[in-house]
């Protein structure tokens, strides 16, 4: 009984505080204010980040505190955001702001009616500072809930400049050139690509890049929503294109068998490790982090990237991902949380993390000079420059059973395809079966 | 349990027919009172979840739609589940049998060792390692790359000690530049050559760092003219570091490939064999006039032996069972050892007096007398094996997960690990329960009988 009374008391206090915040928030508290209007409030933020990412995000939060006087607290949820946040809401201890790492989770939260739509100010910032595509991915049924603060660029092919110089080739501009360059690299004694076949998600990323460039964004969106069947000829064509690379023993380090036995860190090691076996590795911007932290490579000198080249003379793909900030209705200081979002939408907030490194911002108003090194700057430029043609990682948009489960769905089927790429049509049919089951349509 | 309680609570003998009734009822109430907490816990933690799972297995993924037996038919239609059933069957048959056998042998042998306790302790130690940690250890030990996996390092080491390795496993010729690949992996010149000719055999795919230390430029050797009656040539790396070289020609900076075996073949018969010098040059002398092919035998290019793919689709289940044995052998040995120490010594002594040898004693006396203990160990392990999860989940790499899956992992995968179909998961759980029940009943019966 005693306990319940305390809880009641706390929530009353919280309510009063929240009301107070609304009252204060009524005035024009803009990002440039710095009037400490939120003193005494604590904004709780939950997200998947830990380690250096958490530290750097804390710097952003500190800058927010500096400006508004609100205290902030970051809670790391581990990988499974939706479960953790769900149980916290049920336990009456909801965080105010959640950094959601996948579109699917954002949609799930919106459907559960947990989210507060973005405030006017935040919406205006999004309209002014972001390409429309980010607004689309932050909206559910026409209402904007999510603000993409951090982005990932998943259309980067990383190479060892030494290996390419040794082979005498330049970073290629088209997919065909890339295969040709790969052939030359392999003549020089190194395999062309390290493929991380043991981790299914790297294979889905390969497929998505080829498909986005070859079939175009409209088909990509339709396939991501499973409005287009996987048996569509465009899928078969993309698989055929991918298979051409996969089955070439000279292009893939260790052949198909070696690739299936390589995990993602292993594939980076094959290019940037002490005993290089391949010249290039395809994956997102985070390859740089692994190459730098684990293998001591200096990015820009010992490791560099070129954008995933265009397939069949179309435009080059830009596959992306990102963490969206959302405000929970049940948060105790949701109003203050919304102000945090308004702050996160400003280039000023993005600059704080950009200077610290390991960060890409989809905010086009962010001065590219804020990035600490040339390679990150180039990645950011490519991401922002792609504007509305950016597409989110398709497997992240799919139900987990299809696009995110070890040993099942798309991961498993593409691994089988890597083992034996001879039948793209059959693989497409298998993908369709699995997708139909997972999407339930 | 209940029976004993009741027995103790009620007085030893009812004094009179009429007055005995009340104490007996009181005894029963007291008994119930004592049993109640246990029953409550049992009900809340075992009976209720079991019944709930059974009920849940008749509903669909969302839990709102009654689907009858659909989950059960789906279960036996899904190839992954069928594989799980098959693998579980292999596990249940193989693992307890091997474990009981190994445990028995070790227990009997350990009895005869001086440092029995130390030895037992050592064998029992893996039991102290968590399954997760053991899984990670074995995942590494089984790794296919000999630089990482200790098992393959041993296999490859032994193999290479007998077979030797080739010097240029990655080398190959470009297509259409004067060399043809034979089915066995050897290369030969496409056109015939005769004594007095000089040939240049260009290969690619060798890292400059992998060349033998004494390898020198092939250009001077390629320029040298052959004497009459002499067939000479050069095997070289047709790739200029940094690019720029012309394909099919010996450029100035291109290196020779030393220690390459070269054969001169005429009409299918080898007329001469030689090895290239440090600049990649070779020559055949004293060949009869005529047309020859120059051949680089496959032994130059034999790929390195890659060892056994322990975690490939074929071997993954045996490999995981191996890891399981490592953990549980100590347990089986200690239990059987305990049974062994209670064996009546006189029977063994008597057999020895009668002149039975150790093998006969083992077969005719020890094993039959130990049979009850062996069965208990066997059945306990069987129950244990049926719920094996962690090892399978951790050791099997993504691409072969489906080949290694057992009922417990499959149950978790379909209900939480991405499938999100707790209806199907419950159905699998019920199947697992049905499979465990006979073993349980058997064990309980045995305990009862041995208590009597």
Image (tube, coloured by chain):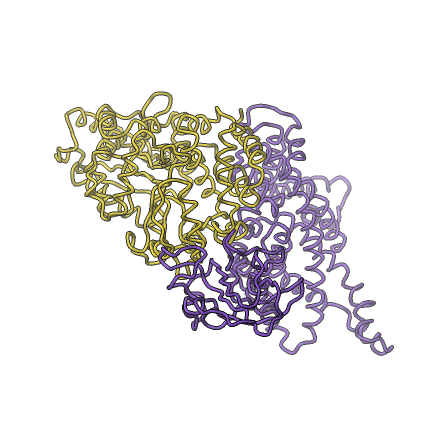
Chain colours: A yellow, B purple
Q: Position of residue A392 (x, y in %)?
A: 38, 33
- Between residue B57 and residue B41, name the one nearer to us: B57
- The reply to whether residue A303 is in sight is yes
A86 in relation to A57, above or below: above
- Between residue A169 and residue A221, name the one nearer to us: A169
In the current view of this chain or complex, which residue is farthest to the top?
A142
Residue B386 is left or right of residue A118, and the answer is right
Q: Position of residue B336 (x, y in %)?
A: 70, 64
Q: Position of residue A310 (x, y in %)?
A: 38, 37
Residue drawn at (63%, 43%), measured in percent from left and top?
Answer: B407
B17 in relation to B450, above or below: above
Picture mark count: 0
Residue A229 is left or right of residue A52, and the answer is right
- Between residue A191 and residue B47, name the one nearer to us: A191
A351 in relation to A160, above or below: above
B210 in relation to A132, above or below: below
Quadrant in the rendering for residue A87? top left
Considering the image in quadrants, where does the N terminus of chain A appear? Answer: top left
Q: Position of residue A232 (x, y in %)?
A: 52, 27
- The reply to whether residue A96 is in sight is no
Residue drawn at (57%, 44%), measured in percent from left and top?
Answer: A420
Quadrant in the rendering for residue A78? top left
């Amino acid at each position: 009984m005693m306990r319940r009374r305390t809880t009641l008391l706390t929530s009353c206090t919280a309510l009063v505080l929240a009301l107070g915040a609304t009252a204060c928030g009524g005035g024009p508290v803009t990002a440039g204010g710095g009037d400490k209007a939120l003193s005494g409030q604590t904004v709780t933020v939950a997200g998947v980040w830990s380690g250096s990412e958490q530290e750097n995000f804390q710097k952003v939060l500190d800058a927010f505190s500096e400006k508004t006087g609100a205290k902030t607290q970051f809670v790391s949820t581990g990988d499974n955001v939706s479960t953790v946040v769900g149980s916290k809401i049920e336990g009456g201890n909801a965080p105010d702001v959640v950094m959601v790492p996948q579109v699917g989770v954002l949609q799930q939260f919106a459907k559960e009616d947990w989210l507060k739509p973005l405030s006017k100010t935040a919406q205006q910032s999004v309209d002014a500072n972001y390409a429309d595509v980010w607004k689309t991915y932050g909206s559910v049924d026409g209402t904007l809930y999510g603000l993409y603060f951090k982005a990932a660029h998943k259309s980067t092919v990383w190479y060892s400049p030494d290996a390419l110089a040794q082979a005498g080739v330049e970073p290629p501009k088209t997919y065909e050139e890339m295969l040709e360059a790969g052939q030359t690299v392999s003549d020089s004694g190194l395999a062309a690509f390290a493929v991380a076949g043991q981790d299914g998600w790297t294979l889905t990323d390969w497929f998505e890049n080829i498909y986005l460039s070859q079939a175009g964004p409209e088909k990509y969106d339709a396939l991501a929503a499973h409005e287009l069947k996987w048996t569509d000829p465009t899928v078969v064509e993309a698989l055929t294109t991918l298979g051409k690379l996969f089955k070439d023993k000279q292009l893939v380090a260790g052949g198909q068998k070696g690739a299936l036995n390589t995990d993602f860190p292993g594939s980076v090691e094959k290019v940037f490790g002490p005993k290089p076996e391949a010249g290039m590795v395809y994956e997102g911007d985070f390859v740089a982090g692994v190459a730098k932290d684990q293998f001591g490579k200096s990015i820009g000198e010992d490791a560099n990237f070129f954008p995933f080249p265009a397939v069949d003379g179309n435009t080059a793909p830009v596959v992306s991902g990102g963490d969206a900030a959302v405000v929970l209705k049940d948060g105790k200081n949701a109003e203050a949380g919304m102000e945090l979002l308004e702050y996160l939408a400003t280039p000023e907030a993005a600059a704080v993390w950009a200077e610290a490194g390991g960060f890409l911002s989809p905010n086009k108003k962010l001065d590219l000079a804020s990035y600490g090194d040339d390679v990150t700057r180039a990645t950011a430029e490519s991401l922002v420059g792609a504007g509305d043609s950016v597409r989110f990682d398709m497997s992240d948009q799919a139900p987990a059973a299809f696009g995110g489960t070890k040993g099942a769905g798309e991961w498993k089927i593409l691994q089988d395809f890597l083992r034996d790429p001879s039948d793209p049509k059959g693989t497409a049919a298998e993908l369709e079966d699995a997708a139909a089951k997972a999407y339930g349509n | 349990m209940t029976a004993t309680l009741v027995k103790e609570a009620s007085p030893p003998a009812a004094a009179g027919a009429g007055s005995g009734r009340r104490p007996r009822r009181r005894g029963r109430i007291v008994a119930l009172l004592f049993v109640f907490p246990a029953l409550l816990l049992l009900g809340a933690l075992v009976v209720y979840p079991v019944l709930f799972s059974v009920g849940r297995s008749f509903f669909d993924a969302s839990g709102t739609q009654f689907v009858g037996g659909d989950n059960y038919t789906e279960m036996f239609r899904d190839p992954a589940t069928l594989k799980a059933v098959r693998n579980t069957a292999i596990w249940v048959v193989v693992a307890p049998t091997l474990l009981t056998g190994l445990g028995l042998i070790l227990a009997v042998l350990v009895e005869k060792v001086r440092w029995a306790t130390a030895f037992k302790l050592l064998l029992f130690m893996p039991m102290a390692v968590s399954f997760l940690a053991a899984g990670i250890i074995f995942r590494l030990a089984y790794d296919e790359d000999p630089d990482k996996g200790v098992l393959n390092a041993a296999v490859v080491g032994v193999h290479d000690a007998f077979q030797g390795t080739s010097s240029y496993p990655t080398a190959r010729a470009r297509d259409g530049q004067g060399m043809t690949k034979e089915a066995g992996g050897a290369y030969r010149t496409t056109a015939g050559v005769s004594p007095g000719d000089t040939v240049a055999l260009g290969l690619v795919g060798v890292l400059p760092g992998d060349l033998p230390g004494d390898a020198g430029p092939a250009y001077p050797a390629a320029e040298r003219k052959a004497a009459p009656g002499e067939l000479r040539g050069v095997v070289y790396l047709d790739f200029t570091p940094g690019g720029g070289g012309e394909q099919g020609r010996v450029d100035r900076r291109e290196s020779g490939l030393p220690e390459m075996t070269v054969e001169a073949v005429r009409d299918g018969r080898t007329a001469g064999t030689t090895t290239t010098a440090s600049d990649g040059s070779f020559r055949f002398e004293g060949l009869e006039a005529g047309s020859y092919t120059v051949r680089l035998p496959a032994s130059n290019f034999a790929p390195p032996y890659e060892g056994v793919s322990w975690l490939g689709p074929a071997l993954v289940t045996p490999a995981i069972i191996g890891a399981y044995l490592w953990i549980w052998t100590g347990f089986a040995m200690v239990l059987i050892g305990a049974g062994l120490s209670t064996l009546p010594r006189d029977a063994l002594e008597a057999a020895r007096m009668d002149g039975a040898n150790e093998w006969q004693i083992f077969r005719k006396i020890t094993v039959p007398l130990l049979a009850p203990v062996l069965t208990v160990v066997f059945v306990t392990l069987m129950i244990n094996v049926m719920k094996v999860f962690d090892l399978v989940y951790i050791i099997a790499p993504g691409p072969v997960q489906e080949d290694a899956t057992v009922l417990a992992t499959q149950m978790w995968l379909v209900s939480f690990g991405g499938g999100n179909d707790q209806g199907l998961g419950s159905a699998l759980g019920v199947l697992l329960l049905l499979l465990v029940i006979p073993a349980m009943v058997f064990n309980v019966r045995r305990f009862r009988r041995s208590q009597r």
